[in-house]
Image (cartoon, helix red, strand yellow):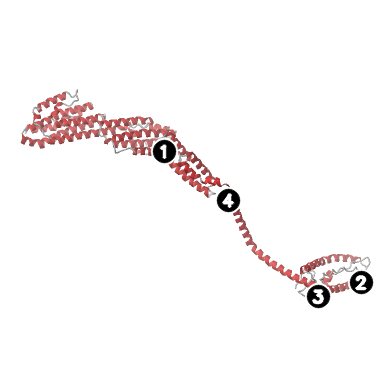
Amino acid sequence: MGTSHDAALSIDRPATSADRAIRNPAELKSRASPRPRPSGRIGQISSPPPPPPPPPRTPGGDHTMSAAATATAATSATSALMAAPDMMDDAYLSDLLSYSLERLDAEPEKLDADASRATESERRVACEEYRAFVASADCYATVRGEIRAIGDRLDAMRDALPTLRAGCEAFAAEAESIARSRALVRATAHHQSALLDVLEAPTLQDACARHGNYDEALDLENFVRKLASAHADDVAVVKTLAENAAEASSAMRAKLVDRLRGAAQLPECLRVVGYLRRMCAYEEDELRDVFLRAREAHIADAVDELETSGSPYEYVKRLTDAHRVHCFDVVMQYRAIFADDDDADDHVGNGTGSGVSSSFSSLSIGGRSRGGGGGGDGGLLYSWSAHRIASYLRALESTLPKIDEGGALASVHEHCAYCGASLARVGLDFRASLPPMFSDAAMGIYRRRLDDAVGDFEKVTEQHRWAAAAAVGAGAGARDAGDAASAGDASSSAPPYALLEHVPVAAFTNGVLAALNELRHCAAPSLRTRAAEATRDAIRAAADAMARTDASVMGRETLTRGSGQRAAFVGACDALTDVAAPYLAGCFGRLFKGGERMVDARGACEELRLALRRRANE
């Protein structure tokens, strides 16, 4: 067993004798024995202090001090012995300085005697108290082993400290996360009702939009938008709410635009456009375009709902009424809602006459004016107006040929002119585009009636049985009647009675008169040339029919049955050339002043006269 620099006593492993328990008695003696204190006289040394009392003994005579008590006592004694030499050395040196020479000479012997006594005392104590020394050695060994084990455990604990530190940090972080989650859950539970209201905002917005409560729906949309701008990046639920609100806003926007596609009056249009502006769904130009597109869809739907399978006359009137009402309303609504379009409106107002009509085909809804239209909206209103009027005029142009009565056509023209005059107050005067279409329609009616009259006349001339009785004096009577008719053209419009003797010619005359009567309702001056040509062609066609009949039928009748029917046929030809043709030319002249010269009835019948002369000379 090694020595310790902190211990005053050096004790071996369990010793068998007291001598082995003390390894250096001299050192123990020098530290444990009290130094003699000098007295007042040289050579007098104070006696050493009495030894410590022995440990208590049990009634049987054995020591019962526990190892811990023994170790405590030994430690206290050792500490006292360690502190005592220094103090005694200082006192002893101070005493030596006061000794006499003789005392100093005798001091070594005295010290040897004291050392002997101390050695003997120590030996005696060691022999008597050897159990305490053995117990102290055992206690020291036990303590040293435990200290070594504690050191090993401290090393193990030191090695485990990083893992423990990491575990503690992870636990602290998890505990902090759990604490935040718990605080969040508590806050959520505390504000549950408010959170439910926020989560139901998109659904409530959609319900308000479906029931027409657009103000409340817009308020909810603004609330969700502000909430999203503040928390959408941090809270996923708020981002989802913003997306749902955007979907509800899109549905509401579509519903508002659909309301513009219906029969909406100005107050309703103002409210809807105001809602769209509050939604910031469109820019100002886009909003105008959307408005006009929606109103265009409404007018198109109204036009599509019109019954086209019925009378063309009724259809055109209803079509005209629809455009007169709806176009006027749309222009007024646009001006009231978008009040900065004065320049554009003025430009629309200047769009009258054939110039606007010629530009309709190059304009479409949603575009910009390519004819120089300007204004606050870039000519958008002008483009839409031109498109809608062009659509109306195309529908009118395609429907007018289906009208087969001049009176109905004149009534439609008057109705369309009234519509143009009404729309002229908002700059949509299209009346200058009506005469060409109605002239063509009137000319179509006139041509169809003339064609019917010529066709019936051709059929009759091929199948008619010419009566011999009607031929007696027919030539002279026809000439007299023709002269009378020629003389009375200027004063009387009644048909000559001489035509009654020749039924086919009378029927042809009635057919041409019926055509003139149809044309009379829409007798535009621009029709005079074309109508004169059509009348001349009809008279020429009738004369050619008589000439063909003379060549194909009457020639055979003359050879087989004599000249009675031939005379009747010749009388009908004379009635056509000398009575009916001049009379019809005169009637045309009453319809168009000076038009009888343009008909040239004599020239139209010249071929028939030549054929009759050739037949008479055979």
Measure the C-alpha gap from mark 4 to mark 1: 48 Å
Q: The C terminus appears in which quarter of the rendering?
A: top left
Q: Residue furthest top?
A: 491
Foreground residue, 459 or 417? 459
Residue 551 position within the rendered picture, expressed as x and y whole percent measured from the top left? 10, 36
Q: Secondary structure at mark 3?
A: helix
Asked whether, in this view, residue 398 is left or right of residue 552, the answer is: right
Q: Is residue 33 shown left or right of residue 487? A: right
- Residue 243 x %, y %: 49, 47
Measured in 3D between alpha carbons, the distance from the residue under mark 3 to the one under mark 4, in whole angstroms, is 78 Å
Which numbered circle lies on residue 106?
Answer: 2
Q: Are marks 1 and 2 in contact (CB under 8 Å)?
A: no
Q: Amino acid at mark 1?
A: Leu
Q: Residues within 10 Å of mark 2 (few under 14, many from 20)?
A: few
> Which numbered mark, 1 or 2, is in the foreground of this view?
1
User: Callout 1: helix, strand or loop?
Assistant: helix
Quarter of the image where one finds residue 503: top left
Identify which amino acid the numbered label 4 is placed on. Answer: Val
Q: Position of residue 407 (x, y in %)?
A: 26, 30
**Closer to us: 102 or 601:** 601
Quadrant in which the N terminus appears: bottom right
Image depth: mark 4 or mark 1 in front: 4
Would you name the residue on which mark 4 appears?
A: 185
Marks 3 and 2, the one that precedes in the sequence: 3
Q: Earlier in the sequence, mark 4 or mark 2?
A: 2
Q: Is residue 281 visible?
A: no
First in residue order: circle 1 vs circle 2: 2
Q: Are marks 3 and 1 in contact (CB under 8 Å)?
A: no
Q: Which residue in the protein does label 1 denote?
A: 260
Dot label at residue 18? 3
Q: Is residue 353 above or below residue 237?
A: above
Helix, strand or loop status at disc 2 = helix
